[in-house]
Image (tube, grey):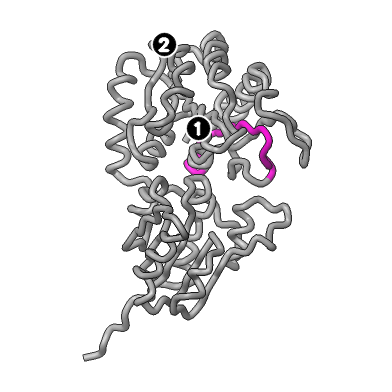
Amino acid sequence: MPVTPPSPKVLFVSSNRIGDCVISSGVVREIARQVPGARITVACGRPPAPFFRAAPNVERVIILDKKKMAGHWVALWRQVVGTRWDMVIDIRGSALSYLIPARRRVVYNRSWETGLPKVEMVSRMMGAPSTLAPELFIDDRARAEAAVVIDPQLATAPGPIMALAPIAHQPGKSWPADRWGALVEKLKAEPRFDGWRFMPVGGPGDRAPATPALQAAGPRGIDFVGKGDILASAAAIDRAALFVGNDSGLMHVAAAAGRPTLGLFGPTEWWLYGPWGPRTRTVASNETRGAFAPIEDLSVDHVFDAILTLHDHYIGSGEPPG
């Protein structure tokens, strides 16, 4: 009898950050195109790991917890060195990719950064014929976890949901928490948003920055802060009609889900790291490319006006929200 050859093995070393994992998520589909029948092992940080549990052709997820003296790389090497990989893809540009057996290596190099958005850089790295749009792989478990939280709160007052992400874990990226409260008060008074619900989303440590928005929302609030892992948060955002958030992983999640998305930027490159997709917008404290200002310079009125524009273009125009 003919012997069936083993499936090709691909190692995808992804990021420890949620946003970067979303930005490079199109790599999963591209692996299937370039290596038909491949079985994929993903190595990534703990927070974004749930993204890959339902991704096509992914058979294993290795969580890469940072350790002293680069011990996390040694631990990963021990887990993968015994496999003869058909392809190794490393968006972190680590030395690991050169220390394990592989027929082909695709390793990110910072010298390629010439002002293109990161999504396009990753696509070029892979040699893809077109841009690898970010993609979410939301499973039934995540949707059920989101429904357990949202449905009882929505039952009291059904209406469209505006998801809010008033958090960012890098210095300078977080719009002041009190302005999120002022923004929600202003949105509640706007006729376009009569009957809308306001849903802050975030992890367990994001309660403080989300509190002013939740307090301002009052009975119209839906609390999804610290209610599940990142895939459950993605499922919650996928139920929103519109998303507003700081430059964060959740902003990239919303864009990948196809929600009309507004990203708030301070002293970071909005032209490189803005949300990717046709239904996205950014608003920055300094909107001159190459110039920066503290995110505190971004006023409530400026953000409010940008939300109205986003609403009128994608929702008020009659375009379906999904």
Q: Are marks 1 and 2 in contact (CB under 8 Å)?
A: no
- Residue extending farthest front: 69
User: Residue 242: horizontal and vertical position, in percent?
Assistant: 51, 29
Residue in view at x 66 percent, y 24 percent: 296
| Distance Cα–Cα, label 1 vs label 2 | 28 Å
- Which residue does the numbered mark 2 point to in the structure image? 218
**Horizontal arrangement in the rendering, residue 193 relative to residue 40 (left or right):** right
Judged from the image, the secondary structure of the residue bearing numbered disc 1 is: loop
User: Residue 12: horizontal and vertical position, in percent?
Assistant: 45, 64
Of the 4 image quadrants, the one containing the N terminus is bottom left
Disc 2 packing (10 Å; few <14; some 14–19; many ≥20): few
Residue 268 within the segment the image draws in magenta: yes
Depth order, front residue of 245/208: 208
**Horizontal arrangement in the rendering, residue 99 relative to residue 287 (left or right):** left
User: Residue 243: horizontal and vertical position, in percent?
Assistant: 52, 30
Looking at numbered disc 2 in the image, what kind of residue is underneath it?
Gly
- Residue extending farthest left: 1
Looking at numbered disc 1 in the image, what kind of residue is underneath it?
Pro
Judged from the image, the secondary structure of the residue bearing numbered disc 2 is: helix
Residue in view at x 50 percent, y 44 percent: 256
Instruction: Say how many tags the image has.
Output: 2
**Extent of the magenta region:** 256-271
